[in-house]
Amino acid sequence: MANPQRLDNRCLSGLVICISKNNRKLRLVSNGRILLTLDARFGSEFNPTREGTFKIYYKDRNHVSGLYGSKMPFSMFFSRGQAVHYSSDFHNRGWAGHSHGCVNIRDWNGITYLWNHAPVGTKVVVYR
């Protein structure tokens, strides 16, 4: 199978949210074909975004963080409280910031598409 984007091999079969920390990109991939590419921002060295293979275990359209009180629209939780979600801070400030471990997305239309096309149980791969 051709892999011109050099996706992690774990992203090449089935429906996968494929997240590259080095490229700062989230891709929705179906059987090796990229359906969507979004900019992604991650946690700091003190609150890093976990790497590995996970599954979306819970979705909450209008989540508010119990720890930080921040709005987390379109939250898709994949690892012990870490989620992919829209971030108004990332939208407004760009790369000058970080999350508390979540995968921040700044594109409202993009996160809406992802939310609608990645059901609970979708594989999530986070790698460098």
Image (cartoon, rainbow, N blue to C red):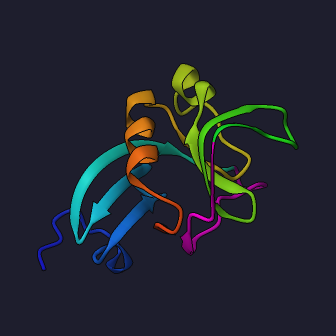
**Residue 45 is inside the magenta segment:** yes
Quick check: 32 left or right of 55?
left
Q: Which residues are magenta?
A: 44-60
Image height check: is 127 above or below 84? below
57 or 105, nearer to the observer? 57
Q: Residue at x 42, y 61 (%)?
A: 17
Q: Residue at x 45, y 39 (%)?
A: 111
Q: Position of residue 13 (x, y in %)?
A: 29, 78
88 or 43, nearer to the observer? 88
- Please, which residue is most extreme toward the top here? 92
Q: Position of residue 105 (x, y in %)?
A: 50, 39
Q: Position of residue 58 (x, y in %)?
A: 64, 58
Q: Residue at x 86, y 42 (%)?
A: 66
Q: Position of residue 10 (x, y in %)?
A: 38, 79
**Residue 32 is inside the magenta segment:** no
74 or 98, nearer to the observer? 74
